[in-house]
């Protein structure tokens, strides 16, 4: 016991003082309501849902390509009936080819031929052959011969009213029935029918005049090749005509033969529309060839895929996903419906599993971001951009791989490597490596890739992130991309030799091809990023080392104005640039950014240069005639003027931060004390320090913090009467400590160890600037130059 209380009593008292667990729950509720937590949850949900959706579509319908080499068998996941596309197509094409073409009678020619045969009878009105005009005996440029015996024979068939008697009409109809029971085709159609793969048949649609006759049985619906004639084959046609005009008077038969041959035309013309329709109907009438496949049986063996293999894989995918019609569902038995319902349930569980995996990846990724790059969470626009980059890289990979399966080593590495390089430029190397690794993991899940491929991709993004601390030259990104490509090339060769079955034909060639694709991916990424770097800087508001070098050029208009209109401020900026650069190198910050920021930090003094002591050149101090409050407005106003000028000259945001934060929220001590003395003399209350402080903001980065320290130190160092190293060191330490105690470094990630390193680097630079010099004698007491005893002695720092 202690203090007269038992152990149990003390525990109850402690629990009572601690309160109930409801306080922890309340803190959790309060945290969940925070803006950062809400946006993080939204980004996690978006990445999980959209990433899972992309992966589901990719894994459930993998794409293969004709000629693609597969090294593992593809197994049927369910029992299904597959259509043998090649055999079915072959049967359908055979049915199409066997379908005869359809020809329609040339009825205009039928009427013309009937008229020509009957017109012969009208010649009987002449007494002899010599009286017949030559025009009546000329047909299509050919002269028709008629004998006196033939003319006499025709008179028997001419009625008194000069009309043709019924007997001649009957003979004409009988001949036309025969003549249109064969097919006389033009040369093109005749050749086409002989070249067509049908069994030498054509279908005829006869003239309606013959079909209306009482004896249509003489008109065959189809013809073989033996009853098809070419219009230019005069001898065969002549034989057919002679054999079928025997019922005409013998004396007129030669004249009829010459007349029919002279007026001949194709008696049947092909009907392309009816022919096409008939052949399509025959094509569609062929039932598909069905082959049943049982579940867990090999569909495709390892080897090169052909069109039939691709078709079989796609049919299995459709069957597995339940892509069937309502009519098929209605025809299923209860057992089949139960099996399909079970399969659909398992598919949905699989989909939920995929979304769950992406939820884990997204949660881990955003927890990392929340801890190491919180501005992505506090700035929803940046978080949205990052989410889009990750999902867009995944989507492009899946789409490109489905369109070009054989280019996997290019389509699957390009987006991940591109995102890694972009994020290394926009943020930093560690962050880019983490996001790149997450993208590679998502790609591997979406495309069901082996660990061996992940090794290749991880090698590429690791090298890219490691070699890209900053974009210092125009060839930096291209070089990094090329090196990443070379490393992935080597990794692809080694992984391929270690994991791929080299005994399969063309596998070694495939390994080399994949390695070349990885190499090309790296080179292409570097070139793409380099070409779009200006746009990337503008969109993401970043500034690369190349851009900083451009702004560090003394020929820039703004720096020229500073040098001409405020020369003292320009020299002040040069000295600070040297100090800031050495301090940045000491703590691993960006030296170039510090130098360029130092050159532009005081551009606001251009508007009123003579109100700042470095530009007065020993002249009168203009603040002597102003009140402390008015002087304060002018002094503080140079920050606001600098920001407006930076916007006018389109300076990058990172340089604007140097302008607005190079004084932080420090106190304008000189005019504060002047105002304080003035108030004391007027017996008024002392002014508030807040009124005499710069508006800020405080430095947000190490580089801006270095700028704030150097600006105060450089101005103070010029006031030292005897700037010895000891005094300079004390000055640097005092000002740095003062800024630290004033809270100016509260919003940047500057440590005390780094602050100490910055002090040492600045002290070295100041000692180099204010080094000791030799005092030369006056001109009238100058020693003899030839006397070596009077020569000045070289000292350290001269």
Image (spheres, rainbow, N blue to C red):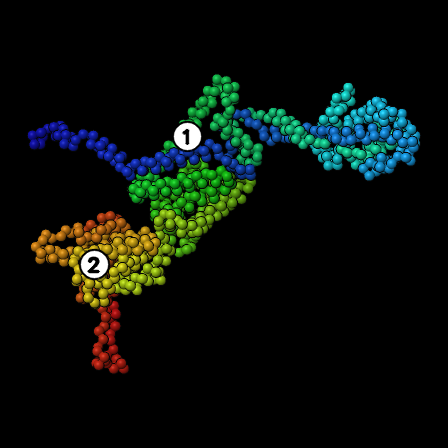
Front residue of 22 and 17: 22
Q: In the displayed structure, would residue 405 be above or below residue 203?
A: below
Sequence-wise first label, 2 or 1: 1
Q: Is residue 645 left or right of residue 679?
A: right
Q: In the displayed structure, would residue 330 be above or below residue 30?
A: above
Q: Residue at x 48, y 18 (%)?
A: 335
Quadrant that contains the C terminus: bottom left
Secondary structure beneath label 1: helix
Q: In the displayed structure, would residue 388 be above or below residue 745?
A: above
**On the image, which quarter does residue 221 sit in?**
top right
Q: In the displayed structure, would residue 683 be above or below residue 787?
A: above
Secondary structure beneath label 2: helix
Q: Is residue 161 left or right of residue 446?
A: right
Quadrant that contains the N terminus: top left
Taking the view exactly as shown, the residue that stands out farthest to the top is: 334
In the rendered image, which residue does mark 1 sit on? 351
Front residue of 327 and 120: 120
Indicate which disc residue 732 carries.
2
Q: Residues within 10 Å of mark 1 (few under 14, many from 20)?
A: some
The answer to whether any part of residue 485 appears in the image is: no
Q: Residue at x 25, y 55 (%)?
A: 639
Instruction: Find residue 333 and report its horizontal and vertical position in percent.
Output: 50, 18
Instruction: Find residue 467 and report its horizontal and vertical position in percent.
Output: 38, 51
Give the CA separation, mark 2 to mark 1.
63 Å
Q: Is residue 215 left or right of residue 362?
A: right
**On the image, which quarter does residue 208 sit in?**
top right
Front residue of 149 and 59: 149
Instruction: Find residue 272 and report its horizontal and vertical position in percent.
Output: 67, 32
The answer to whether any part of residue 56 appears in the image is: yes
Instruction: Find residue 582 and report its horizontal and vertical position in percent.
Output: 28, 58
């Amino acid at each position: 016991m202690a203090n007269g209380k038992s152990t149990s009593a003390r525990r109850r008292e402690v629990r009572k003082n601690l309160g109930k667990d409801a306080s922890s729950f309340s803190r959790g509720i309060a945290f969940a309501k925070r803006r950062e937590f809400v946006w993080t949850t939204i980004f996690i949900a978006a990445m999980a849902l959209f990433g899972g959706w992309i992966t589901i579509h990719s894994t459930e319908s993998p794409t293969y390509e004709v000629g693609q080499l597969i090294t593992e068998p593809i197994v049927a996941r369910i029992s299904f009936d597959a259509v043998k596309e090649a055999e079915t197509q072959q049967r359908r094409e055979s049915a199409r080819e066997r379908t005869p073409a359809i020809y329609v009678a040339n009825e205009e020619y039928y009427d013309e031929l009937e008229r020509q045969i009957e017109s012969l009878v009208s010649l009987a009105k002449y007494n002899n052959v010599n009286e017949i005009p030559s025009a009546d005996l000329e047909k299509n440029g050919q002269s028709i011969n008629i004998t006196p015996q033939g003319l006499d024979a025709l008179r028997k068939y001419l009625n008194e009213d000069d009309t043709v008697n019924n007997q001649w009409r009957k003979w004409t109809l009988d001949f036309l029935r025969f003549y249109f029971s064969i097919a006389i085709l033009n040369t093109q159609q005749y050749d086409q029918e002989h070249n067509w793969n049908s069994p030498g048949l054509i279908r005829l649609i006869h003239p309606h005049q013959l079909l209306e006759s009482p004896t249509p049985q003489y008109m065959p619906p189809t013809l073989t090749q033996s009853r098809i004639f070419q219009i230019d084959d005069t001898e065969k046609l002549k034989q057919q005509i002679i054999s079928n005009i025997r019922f005409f008077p013998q004396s007129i038969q030669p004249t009829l033969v010459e007349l029919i041959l002279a007026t001949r035309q194709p008696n049947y013309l092909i009907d392309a529309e009816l022919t096409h329709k008939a052949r399509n109907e025959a094509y569609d009438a062929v039932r598909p060839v069905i082959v049943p496949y049982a579940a867990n049986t090999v569909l495709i063996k390892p080897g090169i895929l052909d069109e039939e293999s691709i078709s079989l894989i796609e049919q299995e995918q459709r069957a597995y996903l339940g892509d069937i019609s309502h009519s098929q569902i209605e025809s299923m038995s209860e057992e089949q419906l139960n099996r399909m319902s079970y399969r659909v349930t398992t598919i949905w569980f699989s989909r939920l599993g995929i979304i769950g995996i992406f939820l884990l990846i997204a949660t881990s990724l955003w927890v990392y971001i929340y801890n190491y790059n919180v501005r992505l969470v506090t700035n929803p626009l940046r978080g949205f951009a990052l989410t889009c980059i990750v999902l867009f890289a995944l989507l492009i990979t899946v789409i490109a791989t489905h369109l070009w399966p054989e280019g996997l080593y290019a389509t699957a590495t390009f987006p991940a490597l591109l995102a890694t390089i972009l994020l290394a430029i926009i943020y930093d190397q560690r962050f880019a490596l983490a996001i790149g690794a997450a993208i590679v993991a998502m790609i591997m899940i979406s495309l069901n890739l082996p660990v061996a491929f992940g090794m290749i991709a991880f090698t590429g993004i690791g090298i890219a992130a490691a070699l890209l601390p900053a974009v210092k030259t125009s060839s930096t990104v291209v070089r990094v991309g090329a090196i990443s490509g070379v490393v992935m090339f080597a990794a692809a060769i080694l992984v391929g030799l270690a994991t791929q079955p080299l005994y399969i034909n063309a596998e070694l060639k495939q390994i080399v091809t994949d390695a070349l694709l990885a190499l090309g991916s790296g080179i292409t990424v570097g070139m793409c990023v380099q070409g779009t770097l200006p746009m990337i800087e503008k969109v993401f508001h970043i500034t690369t080392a190349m851009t900083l070098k451009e702004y560090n050029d003394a020929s820039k208009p703004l720096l020229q104005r500073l040098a001409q209109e405020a020369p003292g401020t320009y020299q002040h900026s040069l000295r600070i640039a040297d100090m800031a650069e050495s301090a940045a190198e000491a703590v691993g910050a960006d030296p170039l950014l510090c130098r360029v920021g130092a050159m532009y930090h005081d551009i606001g003094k251009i508007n009123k240069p003579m109100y700042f002591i470095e530009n007065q050149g020993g002249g009168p101090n203009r603040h002597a005639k102003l009140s402390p409050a008015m002087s304060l407005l002018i002094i503080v106003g140079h920050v606001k003027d600098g920001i407006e000028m930076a916007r006018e000259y389109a300076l990058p945001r990172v340089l604007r931060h140097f302008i607005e934060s190079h004084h932080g929220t420090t106190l304008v001590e000189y005019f504060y004390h002047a105002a304080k003395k003035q108030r004391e003399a007027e017996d008024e209350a002392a002014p508030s320090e807040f009124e005499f402080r710069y508006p800020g903001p405080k430095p947000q980065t190490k580089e801006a913090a270095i700028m704030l320290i150097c600006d105060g130190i450089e101005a103070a160092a010029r006031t030292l009467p005897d700037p010895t190293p000891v005094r300079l060191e004390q000055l640097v330490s005092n000002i740095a400590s003062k800024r630290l105690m004033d809270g100016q470094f509260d919003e940047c990630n500057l440590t005390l160890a780094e602050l100490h390193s910055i002090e040492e680097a600045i002290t070295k630079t100041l000692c180099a600037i204010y080094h000791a010099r030799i005092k030369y004698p006056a001109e009238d007491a100058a020693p003899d130059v030839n006397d070596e005893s009077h020569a000045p002695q070289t000292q350290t720092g001269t």
